[in-house]
Image (cartoon, helix red, strand yellow):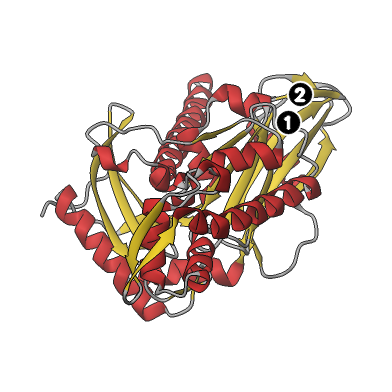
Amino acid sequence: MSQKQDNLIVVLDIGSAWTRVLAADVNEESLRYRGHGIVASAGMRKGLISDLGPAARVVKAANEAAERVAHANIDECVVGVGGPHIRGLNTRGGFELGSRMREITREDVRTAVDHARSVERPADREILHLLPRQFILDGQPGIIDPIGMVGARLEVHLHMATASGSALQSTVTCANRAGLEVTEAVLESIAAAEATLSADERELGVCLLDIGAHSSELVVFYEGAVAYTASVPIGGQHFTNDLAKGLEMPVAQAEELKRQYGHAVVTDVPEFAEIEIANPTMQTLRLRAIAEILQPRARELLQFVKESLRVGRVEDALGAGCVLTGGGAMLPGMLDQVESQLHVPARTGVPVRLSHMPGELVHPSFATIIGMLLYAHRMRLSRAAEDNSLLAKVRAIFAASF
């Protein structure tokens, strides 16, 4: 196995059902797939780590699988964060630049953001992302990047995505026990958006709904910026559990039935279609009986989403509709239910394909982890550009001194 490579980017997604590690390297400023590992999760309960030992062993196994494919040592990663503890908050703040107009600097932008973030929040909340929605310069709104402009007062409208401090620390500790240093944390819904949404959708207004196993994450973009983030406590496992209880069968068998014959719209299933199942003896089952159990749960999920959008005051901001990602997005009829319940167009979000990446990863269930790679790469490029800009200014100062 080769030594650690500086151009390697590795991301870790500890999900309720699966733990995934994905590695890519930067090839001429673009990402190239290097390897991945997927292992069934352990030590998880309701979307959170409940037992560090088994969870860490799974992370280690997934990482070792990725190392074998990538032929590289992996000892650091970016982690994804999601679950029912996610909260979003919109705030604003600003300051006077002085008695006279002057040019806005990067430090001024940081100061405005610091003013906007200094709001009271519970002690256990950790900030994941500070996402400017717009800047206002001398009363002029709608500014995306004020650096280099001239004014006397700078304000910012900011979206803060926060997580439970204990839940975030459990994720970091789990990765550490598996031998991985965590360099950054990314909100999973924002990552999924990175891999699936177009610039036009972000501008017109769009809701990305990432349907996980035990919860579903949502993020709303409007006028190109994040306007709202939240989580709702229903995921694909709830659909499976409903089937297991309703049909009196093991959860594993219910999951297989859901994958093969599930549908979220009863009337789209042929009325007299039947299959034979062993439960425990052979018996006949109407396919509509499966849909009759799944459809109410799909509608309940979307009612939670609808109420969340109402609370966030973004229900009328979805000009481009709703995009579904995650394994739950593949249930037939879900798009129809979204259009019926939310009254917006809907599509399935398929992640972009990285160079050399296996085709089976181009699937809605991999949107989050692929988006994490894209996000981490974009942040790395942004920091490098900022460092180069600072270095150029320092050189200019020294050059002016001689």
Say which amino acid is labelled 1. Answer: Gln
Is residue 94 shown left or right of residue 127?
A: right
Is residue 140 shown left or right of residue 180?
A: right
**56, 179: nearer the viewer:** 56
State the residue position of label 1: 134
Task: Quarter of the image for the N terminus: give it.
Answer: bottom left
Residue at 42% in and 49% down:
273
State the residue position of label 2: 142
Q: Residues within 10 Å of mark 2 (few under 14, many from 20)?
A: some
Say which amino acid is labelled 2. Answer: Gly
Rendered position, 64 above or below 100: below
Q: Is residue 32 visible?
A: yes
**117, 349: nearer the viewer:** 349
Residue at 30% in and 74% down:
57
Q: Secondary structure at mark 2?
A: strand
Q: Position of residue 203 (x, y in %)?
A: 65, 25
Q: Position of residue 9 (x, y in %)?
A: 32, 45
Rendered position, 63 above or below 333: below
Instruction: Locate residue 103: give its quadrant.
Output: top right
Furthest-left residue in this view: 1
Q: Position of residue 251 (x, y in %)?
A: 41, 71
Residue at 87% in and 25% down:
139
Furthest-front residue in this view: 272
Q: Secondary structure at mark 1?
A: strand
**153, 170: nearer the viewer:** 170
Figure label count: 2
Instruction: Locate residue 153: give its quadrant.
Output: top right
CA–CA distance in space, label 2 to label 1: 5 Å
Query: Do the residues bearing badges 2 and 1 touch, measured as CB atoms within 8 Å?
Result: yes
Give the mark nearer the N terminus: 2 vs 1. 1
Residue at 14% in and 50% down:
71
